[in-house]
Image: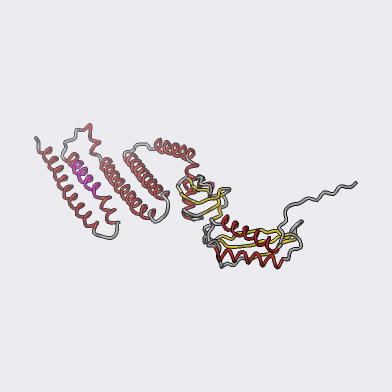
Amino acid sequence: MDDSLLFAIATVIIGLVIAGIARAIVRWLKKFAETTETQWDDIIVAAIGTPVQVGIIAVSVYIALKYFGIVPDQYAWIISDKILNSIYILLGTWIIATLVHDIITIYGHALAEKTEGDWDDRLVELLELAARYIIWFAGIMLILVNLEINITPFLAGAGIAGLAFALAAQDLISNFLGGAIITVDKPFLVGDRVKIDNFYGDVINIGPRSTRLKTLDYQIVTIPNNKITSTYIVNYSEPDVKLRITIPVSVAYGSDPVKVKALLLEIAHDVIERTDYLHKDPAPTAFFLEFADSSLKFILYVWARKYNLPDDVKDAINTRIAGRFAAEGIDIPFPQMEVRLKK
């Protein structure tokens, strides 16, 4: 065995020893990072630890091959500066991809845990995957440029593939962006009672592609997020859960409007005292609206404690109205038609 080969082997062994020392230092740094409050040192150590060790070994092998004349002339390209630069680019890509991935993973999931629903967790997972692929694609392109390989076909192919994917997934992307807008703008939250387009119910899930409502008939309605961002939304839970309920009342001509209004308010206060349906404040109000064709029209406004009580409130008040008006001799008219025949 000639001296050149021995020196080459010794160089590789020295590289392995240095890599082992680096590995021990990285382990110590990891343990130290675990004792600190910040996550940044953990991220940095995890990103550079393994690539640095691999880089030391790779550089030692490169030096052994280049400077001790053991590579045949036909394989001289192996020890060119382009190969060394490619190793540096590869290691840099590895470090950056790991660093970005860990930042998104740690801080992205920490932010996602503070919100309701799981669509933002899925967004973080998508960003993790996308960031890693994009960084590695860029790194590989740089290596090809360094090796003087024409990357135009690769870029053209990537552009065509990206365009095809964008066209095929435009609905998915628009729904995904719609979900992001809903999360940022917060027109409603999970548990809110809303009316979206013609659908009325409680929000049970806000996903990356769609939002689900449970109607009052206990049916699940799935609405694409891009539809929600382009339509009107009524949120019955904001700014608070109380709801004003309108109760129209008609009485026959000849009734005393002052007495009718007093009775309506008396009935409303009776419901307030005897049930848990209504608020005292805002107080109920009654108005005499108009002289209609066959009746006097009134309206009673009351405030329900919660948006899911309109039927209970109307039942309680209308039942009392029927009883009190009958007792007070106030007629509630019904549609009639008078037909006169001439002889």
Residue nearer the viewer, 102 or 22: 102
The residue most toward the right is: 343
Residue found 54% across the figure and 57% down from its top: 307
Left or right position of 274 against 112:
right
Task: Give the dominant element type of the magenta stretch: helix, strand or loop.
Answer: helix
Is residue 62 one of those drawn in magenta? yes
Left or right position of 271 against 113:
right
Residue nearer the viewer, 103 or 13: 103
Residue nearer the viewer, 115 or 142: 115
Is residue 307 one of those drawn in magenta? no
Q: How is the image coloured?
A: secondary structure
Q: Where is residue 166 in the image (x, y as percent from the top left)?
A: 47, 40
Residue found 65% across the figure and 64% down from its top: 264
Quadrant position of the N terminus in the picture: top left
Q: Where is residue 265 in the image (x, y as percent from the top left)?
A: 63, 66
Residue found 16% across the figure and 36% down from its top: 70
The residue most toward the top is: 74
Q: Position of residue 108 (x, y in %)?
A: 37, 53
Residue 148, quarter of picture: top left
Residue 260, quarter of picture: bottom right
The residue most toward the front is: 327
Extent of the magenta region: 49-63
